[in-house]
C-alpha cells in the first residue's frame, strides 16, 4: 500500500511537469510557426531533415531526399549527421501525411528531453532514491525544458539521461524490464547522438564487469550478462541497422558518405580548438579542405581512415604538444560552471568524488538505508568524467557540456538524500537511546 501511494505521488509530480513546464514550452514554440515557410533553420542539417519528410509523404521513404525521381541517401546532403532526428521526423510525417516543420523539430526536442527526464527520475524512484528523484523532477525542468531550438543539440540532455538508464539498472541489479528499457533507450540515444551512445555503452561495459566481479562464483549471472552485452552492442549499432534496412527496402542510390559524425574527424579537429603548432582548426571546412587535397570524398569511409592516420601521427610526432592542448581544454571546462548559476565544473567533480570515496570507505550509504546510493553516485560521477574526456578530446564548449547537467542534478539530489537519510538515522538512534 505504501509503495502504491509513493508511485501515485510520483505520477502526480510527473503530471504537474507535463501540464506545467512542458506544456508551456510546447505552446511557446507555436509563436514561431509563422517563420516556418519563410525562414530556414540556421542549422543546415535541420533543413535537410524537413526535405526528407517530403520524401516520406510522397514516396514512403525514410533517411532519404527525393531529387528528380531519385532517392538520395540523406547522408549525402546532411553531412556528418546522426540519423535520429531525421528518422523520428519521417515517422511523424508518415503518421500525419504532412511535411514536418521547424515547429515540429523544436517540439520533438522538447519531447525527447521530457522522456529522458521522466525515465531517469522513474528509475531513481524505483531504487528508493525518492528524494533524489523528486529533486531531479523539481530542478530538472529549467535544464531539460527551459529552452527550445531546431538543431539536434537541444535534445542532448534528454539523451544523456536515457543513456544512463542501462548502466544504472545493471549496477543496481534492477529487474529485466528496466534493463530491456535501458537497451531501447541506449539505441535511441545513439541514433540521436553517437557520442552520447558511446558514453552509455562504455558505462554499460563497466557496470557489467563490476557486476561480474561482485558475484564471481555465480555462474547463473554469466549468460544474462552476456546477453545484455550482445543486446547493448546491437543498440550501439542502431544507426547502421536503420540505414541497412532503408537500403534493403528502397531503391536507394549508393551512399558515398557514412551516416555518422565520425570519431576520427572529431579527434583530429579537436587538436585545433586551441592554438597549435600544426595550424589545425576546429572547423568542418578545415576537414573538408583536407579531404579535397587528398582527393577524397568528405566524410566517406576513406576520409575517416585518413583522419585516424593523421590523428595518431600527430600524437607520435609530438606527444607533449598534444598533452598541452588537452590540458588547456581540460582547464577551460573545469574552471567554468555548466549549471547557471552554479559552482565551477571542477568543484562539482571534486566534491562528488570526495563524497563518493568517503561513503564507499565507511559504507555510509548502507548505514543510511540506501545501498544503491553508492551506484547512483558512481554512475553520475562517471558521466561527469566522460564529459570532461569529451571536452579534452573534442572541445570544451558550453553547448556540448550542458547535457551533463542531467547527472549534476542527480548528484546534487543524491547528496541531499544522503544528508536527509543521515539525519533521520541519527534521530532514530537518539529516540531509541532515550
Image: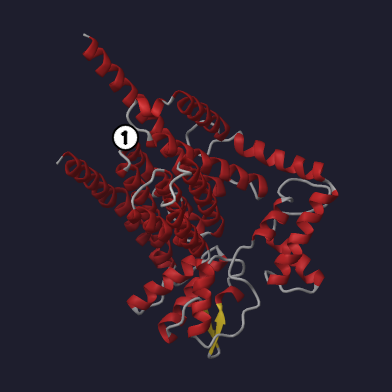
- x and y percentages locating residue 371 in the rendered image: 37, 33
Measured from the top left, where is residue 17 in percent x and y? 29, 48
Specify the quadrant that holds the N terminus: top left
The front one of 355 and 329 is 355
The colour scheme is secondary structure
- Nearer to me, 133 or 281: 133
User: Dot 1, crowdedness within 10 Å: few (<14), some or many (≥20)?
Assistant: some
Residue 370: percent from the left, percent from the top? 34, 32
Residue hosting label 1: 131
Residue 413 shows in the view: no
Regarding mark 1 in the picture, which secondary structure is present there? helix
Task: Classify residue 413 by image quadrant.
Answer: top left
Which picture quadrant has residue 171?
top left
Q: In this rendering, is residue 62 above or below 43?
A: below
Quarter placement of the C terminus: top left
Q: Position of residue 335 (x, y in %)?
A: 61, 33
Which residue is situated farthest in the left direction here? 1
- Left-right relation of 67 to 276: left
Residue reaching furthest to the top: 434
Residue at the spot 44% in from the left edge and 86% down from the top edge: 59
Q: Is residue 165 above or below residue 86?
A: above
Q: Residue at x 41, y 76 (%)?
A: 99
In this view of the protein, can residue 319 be seen by the observer?
Answer: yes
310 sits left or right of 82 in the view: right
Badge count? 1
User: Residue at left 52%, top 41%?
Assistant: 382
Amino acid at each position: 500500500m505504501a509503495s502504491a501511494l509513493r508511485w501515485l505521488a510520483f505520477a502526480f509530480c510527473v503530471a504537474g511537469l507535463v501540464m506545467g513546464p512542458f506544456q508551456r514550452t510546447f505552446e511557446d514554440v507555436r509563436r514561431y510557426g509563422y517563420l516556418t515557410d519563410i525562414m530556414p533553420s540556421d542549422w543546415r542539417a535541420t533543413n535537410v531533415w524537413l526535405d526528407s519528410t517530403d520524401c516520406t509523404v510522397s514516396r514512403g521513404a525514410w533517411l532519404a531526399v527525393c531529387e528528380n525521381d531519385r532517392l538520395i541517401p540523406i547522408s549525402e546532403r546532411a553531412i556528418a549527421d546522426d540519423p535520429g532526428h531525421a528518422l523520428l521526423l519521417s515517422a511523424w510525417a508518415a503518421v500525419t501525411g504532412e511535411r514536418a516543420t521547424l515547429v515540429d523539430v523544436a517540439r520533438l526536442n522538447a519531447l525527447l528531453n521530457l522522456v529522458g527526464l521522466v525515465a531517469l527520475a522513474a528509475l531513481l524512484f524505483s531504487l528508493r532514491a525518492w528524494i533524489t528523484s523528486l529533486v531531479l523532477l523539481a530542478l530538472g525542468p529549467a535544464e531539460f525544458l527551459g529552452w527550445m531550438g531546431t538543431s539536434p543539440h537541444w535534445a542532448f540532455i534528454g539523451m544523456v539521461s536515457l543513456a544512463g538508464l542501462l548502466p544504472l539498472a545493471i549496477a543496481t541489479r534492477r529487474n529485466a524490464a528496466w534493463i530491456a528499457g535501458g537497451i531501447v533507450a541506449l539505441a535511441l540515444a545513439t541514433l540521436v547522438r553517437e557520442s552520447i551512445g558511446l558514453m552509455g555503452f562504455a558505462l554499460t561495459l563497466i557496470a557489467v564487469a563490476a557486476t561480474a566481479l561482485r558475484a564471481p562464483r555465480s555462474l547463473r549471472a554469466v549468460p544474462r550478462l552476456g546477453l545484455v552485452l550482445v543486446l547493448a552492442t546491437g543498440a550501439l549499432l542502431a544507426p547502421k541497422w536503420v540505414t541497412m534496412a532503408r537500403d534493403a527496402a528502397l531503391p536507394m542510390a549508393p551512399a558515398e558518405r557514412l551516416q555518422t559524425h565520425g570519431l576520427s574527424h572529431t579527434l583530429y579537429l579537436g587538436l585545433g580548438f586551441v592554438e597549435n603548432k600544426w595550424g589545425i582548426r576546429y572547423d568542418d571546412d578545415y576537414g573538408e579542405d583536407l579531404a579535397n587535397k587528398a582527393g577524397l570524398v568528405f566524410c566517406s569511409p576513406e576520409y575517416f581512415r585518413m583522419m585516424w592516420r593523421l590523428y595518431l601521427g600527430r600524437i607520435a610526432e609530438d606527444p607533449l604538444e598534444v598533452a598541452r592542448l588537452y590540458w588547456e581544454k581540460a582547464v577551460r571546462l573545469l574552471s567554468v560552471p555548466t549549471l547557471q548559476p552554479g559552482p565551477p565544473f571542477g568543484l562539482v567533480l571534486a566534491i562528488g568524488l570526495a563524497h563518493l570515496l568517503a561513503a564507499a570507505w565507511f559504507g555510509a550509504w548502507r548505514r543510511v538505508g540506501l545501498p544503491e546510493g553508492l551506484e547512483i553516485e558512481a554512475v553520475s560521477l562517471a558521466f561527469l568524467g566522460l564529459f570532461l574526456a569529451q571536452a579534452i578530446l573534442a572541445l570544451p564548449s558550453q553547448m556540448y557540456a550542458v547535457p551533463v547537467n542531467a547527472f549534476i542534478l542527480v548528484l546534487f539530489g543524491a547528496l541531499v538524500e544522503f544528508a536527509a537519510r543521515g539525519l533521520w538515522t541519527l534521530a532514530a538512534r537518539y529516540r531509541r537511546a532515550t
